[in-house]
Amino acid sequence: MTTILTGVGASTGIVQGPARLVHGPDEFSRFQSGDVLVCRTTDPAWTPLFGMASAVVTQTGGMLSHAAIVAREYGIPAVLGVRDALEMLVDGTHLTVDGAQGTVTAADRE
Amino acid sequence: MTLLTLHAVRLLGFADTEAVAARFAQSRAVVESELIDAGVDGFVSYSTFAGTSGWSLSSLGRAENERLLAHELHLAEARGTVVAVHEEFAEFNTGVVGACSAIQLQSPATEDAMDVLIGALAAWRPMEEQLTVLLPRFDGYAERLLRALRHAPEGTAWLTATDRDSFHRIWFELHEDLIATLGIQRA
């Protein structure tokens, strides 16, 4: 069984990696290189995480957002405007992020 | 803890002591001392990301920053002005983000995109002048945006990159500054 969430594909590319749900700067230290960043929104404080992330999934934003521009600069896929991403995705779950199609596929945990 | 030190960390997001001090032309020694105190209070933390070390704001620090900004706004009687500027900024923000996207994606609209950025800077100048009368710390954005545009012929990195003071990085910081000053959340 898999869960597929959709949003706006704002930066192209397909990658796989573990979901890392980040609710605020206090949780930045949990973030590991290769994680998929899953968050509500981003601001300048989040930019260093883009340098470590394999992909970005946000609940807000779209094709024309600051997060989209920063993701493209780092050359990582971004799916933005995924409503309820923080509620629907589980930390550590294996994700496939398709930044062209705007899909986030999560392998359900057994 | 002064407003400027905490706010510099907020605007820069993640920065070393030199950069935090430079943001508002403060003494490095004073800022270093304030950052250490802020660390003790749990407002900031020092960490390493991808080989770079720097200060960042905690959730508690963000709340303290917004408390200090609200006090500043009240003392300066500037809320009405900042609200009006933020509304006008938002109109140009869509165009700037679209232009930066067009440049990155090398769409046919790239040439028009430069005109959009030049127009946005022209629109921002009077807004900055309005703001700095009441809140002098807003000074400098227009100058930095102009510098980025002047470097643009060297490469589009000066318009969109994150590793230098590019047009988008400055604009993103300015957006954060307006949002923080009003104590509102990013849409």
Image (tube, coloured by chain):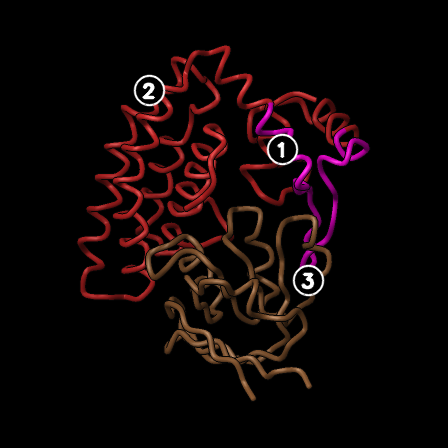
Chain colours: A brown, B red
Residue linked to disc 1:
B63
Tag in front: 2 or 3: 3
Residue B135 x %, y %: 45, 17
**Residue denoted by label 2:** B129
Residue type at the position of mark 3: Phe
Q: Position of residue B161 (x, y in %)?
A: 44, 54
Q: Is residue A57 magenta?
A: no
Secondary structure under tag 3 reads: loop
- Chain letter for mark 2: B
User: Do the residues at discs 2 and 3 belong to one chain?
Assistant: no
In this picture, is B186 found above or below B182?
Answer: below
Q: Residue A31 carries which label?
A: 3
Secondary structure under tag 2 reads: helix
Q: Which of marks 1 and 2 is in front?
A: 1
The mark closer to the camera, 1 or 3, is 1
Magenta run includes residue B59:
yes
Circle 1 residues within 10 Å: few <14, some 14–19, many ≥20 = some
The 10 Å Cα crowd at callout 3, few under 14, some 14 to 19, many 20 or more, is some
Q: Looking at numbered disc 1 in the image, what kind of residue is underneath it?
A: Ala
The image's mark for residue A79 is none
The magenta segment is B38-67
Q: What residue type is labelled 2?
A: Glu
